[in-house]
Image (cartoon, coloured by chain):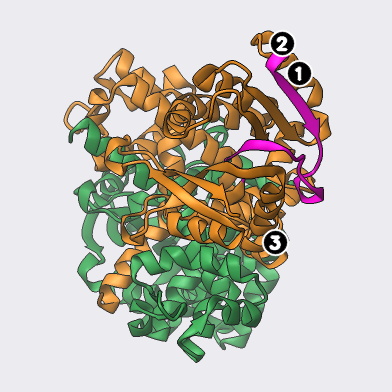
Chain colours: A orange, B green
Amino acid sequence: MTAQATLARFREYMVGPARFMNLLSCFELGLIDALRDKPGRTAAELGATVGAKPDAVEQLLYLPVKEGFVEHDETAGTYSLGALADVADVDLQRVLAFMDKIKVTTLRQLYYLTDSVRTGAPVGLRELYGFQGDLYGAMGVHADLRESWSRLMDSVTGRIDPWFFGAIDIPAGAQVLDLAGHTGLGAIHTHRFKGSPGLRVTTFDLPDKREECLRNFREHGVDGESSFIGGDVFDGVPRGFDVVLIKHFLNMFDKAEALKILGEVHKSLEAGGQVHILVPIYAEDLKESRSVDYYPSFFLGCATGQGGPQKLSTFRGWLQEAGFTVTRETSQDPASLPPDALPLQGILSATKNG
Amino acid sequence: MTAQATLARFREYMVGPARFMNLLSCFELGLIDALRDKPGRTAAELGATVGAKPDAVEQLLYLPVKEGFVEHDETAGTYSLGALADVADVDLQRVLAFMDKIKVTTLRQLYYLTDSVRTGAPVGLRELYGFQGDLYGAMGVHADLRESWSRLMDSVTGRIDPWFFGAIDIPAGAQVLDLAGHTGLGAIHTHRFKGSPGLRVTTFDLPDKREECLRNFREHGVDGESSFIGGDVFDGVPRGFDVVLIKHFLNMFDKAEALKILGEVHKSLEAGGQVHILVPIYAEDLKESRSVDYYPSFFLGCATGQGGPQKLSTFRGWLQEAGFTVTRETSQDPASLPPDALPLQGILSATKNG
């Protein structure tokens, strides 16, 4: 790459934040909906509809017009949907949910990325919300973070869990531990997708999750075959299980902490027991990775101040180091994902050695 | 553009903020300098040098490695500069000054873009700094904004003013008004680049600029041929001038306000007097405009809550509407700018009609 090409690429980086918010703001203001309802409107008409000055509407629509998302008839001075007219509503809603999540959990927080890396904590949450802790804790207190996150995650979990449970084996009648299982959804899904006579699932998470978790078990009619144990994974994990599930959790930690968790899981499993890990991953060939453009700064600057996705081969190495033999690896096929998808998920199944 | 292509393009927008800050943070932490000083270092060595955990260093370097900015030897586990090794220091410093300006004046503020458009004010400055007013006012109070801005603008003005004064005529002995001339730099440059016997330049700006402006005149030895008049352009402009300069000002306003300013300038000029306008512009063919990716959301969300660059043809139309005949238009040739340059500047010279 020549110096000129590098500098041109830097320009793309420089306009990233402004481009992002310019586009999202067109949706937030209702400009795109207004053009869908009634194409061929002027900036003055659009401004009156969405409650903004025509001058500002013109400014905001320059970029979507440049991109071809919106069309501008210079002679008539009117706007209509361009390429956006052909995007299905379900696709658009998925993208907008993710963009809102980025806006609420990431955009401002990124300002503190360097401080977050230096201190190993998401400084933006402290500066912007006065919150000491990680994003998952902050969501318990701050409705804006929680709502934006949930809107996205509800649809993600709905897609990912069937795929996860389809890719793993859980022996009939097994004793299963769902590590960091939050308020029981993983346990409920285990019963739904892998139900068998005698199957018992225990959700392990911080004690403050107990009440909501038990209520969820009752509401889903699995309270007889499910239980909750409160505790902190770094203080030890309950023992005597055939299967441990670790979903969306190991990637929240740096290697030393992840190995500590896997060590505890190793102790919690019976001989020959299995662990199944669901994690966001980077493609083995970085050049093909989409998630690497977003997740390093998200985890370091906005979520936990540490952790992040890894290559599947890295997670495999960690499992081996912790005394497991990896029996199966699965990753999503990028070609099967929507073109806007950022995360790529991987599953590793492993058996406890000796 | 197919729906698939549109969604893929949306993905580029979604990763914009994270990409921006990931790259900038590598410089802020000193990772790039450390690799320039001594190539072939591991994440552990780099972490020790810059004061960060090796895990975080690895995460932050994934993206520059993907881009080819940095190289990673997977076998040795070491990093070296890739394409970044070939970028001249002067180019890198220019880019980093602009990236810091974007980080400090834009990144967090963009969160409030939609509110800013609805209210016509930069809401982010109120929310983040408790400041009522525009960015230029906020810089007077908040050192972080001022310092980041100045670092960038000192170098920009140094490049732009010689070009501006080379492109305009100022008759010998003319009486010149520098509208919104801040603390006198425009007047000083008028004397430097267009000096002539009898030439007199008056800086017109808010009264609180008087003292610093007069001091600047003295320090540059032009106090005998320069003066300061305090006032607000919307309350009227001093009269009796042959030439009015409007540099980096008209683009801060929506059309109605810009026409009001031009109307006042019309009254301030003698018959046959000339106005010279320096403004950031969008290329006539939007598809070729670089500035349109950044400036709409910057002006609306972060600077003034209104205004923004326009096409040269739009500014021409405004001048004609205000009673001027445009005699000369100049714009920067994008091909002559560095590949990372975002703003494109235009100059319009016009004569007062009748």
Q: Chain of mark 3?
A: A
Relative to the observer, which residue lies in front, A139 or A32? Answer: A139
Report, in whole angstroms, how far the alpha carbon at label 1 lies from the one at label 3: 34 Å
Q: Secondary structure at mark 1?
A: helix
| Mark 1 / mark 3, whichever is N-terminal | 3
Q: Which circle, 3 or 2, is nearer the viewer?
A: 2
Q: Secondary structure at mark 2?
A: helix
Q: Is residue B34 left or right of residue A124?
A: left
**Region of the chain picked out in magenta, as a range:** A224-249
Q: In the rendering, at what x and y percent does residue A31 appear?
A: 39, 25
Q: Is residue A246 above or below residue A211?
A: below
Asked if residue A185 shows in the view, the reply is yes
Residue drawn at (40%, 78%) of the image: B75
What residue is pinned by disc 2? A218
Q: In the rendering, at what x and y percent does residue B15 appear?
A: 43, 49
Was residue A43 drawn as part of the magenta stretch in this picture? no
Contact, mark 1 vs mark 2 (Cβ under 8 Å): yes
Query: Which amino acid, mark 2?
Result: Arg
| Mark 3 / mark 2, whichever is N-terminal | 3
Q: Quadrant of the N terminus of chain B?
A: top left
Asked if residue B201 shows in the view, the reply is no
Query: Which amino acid, mark 1?
Result: Leu
What residue is pinned by disc 3? A120
Relative to the observer, which residue lies in front, A136 or A9? Answer: A136
Instruction: Determine which of the numbered discs, if any, sits on residue A214 in the image.
Output: 1
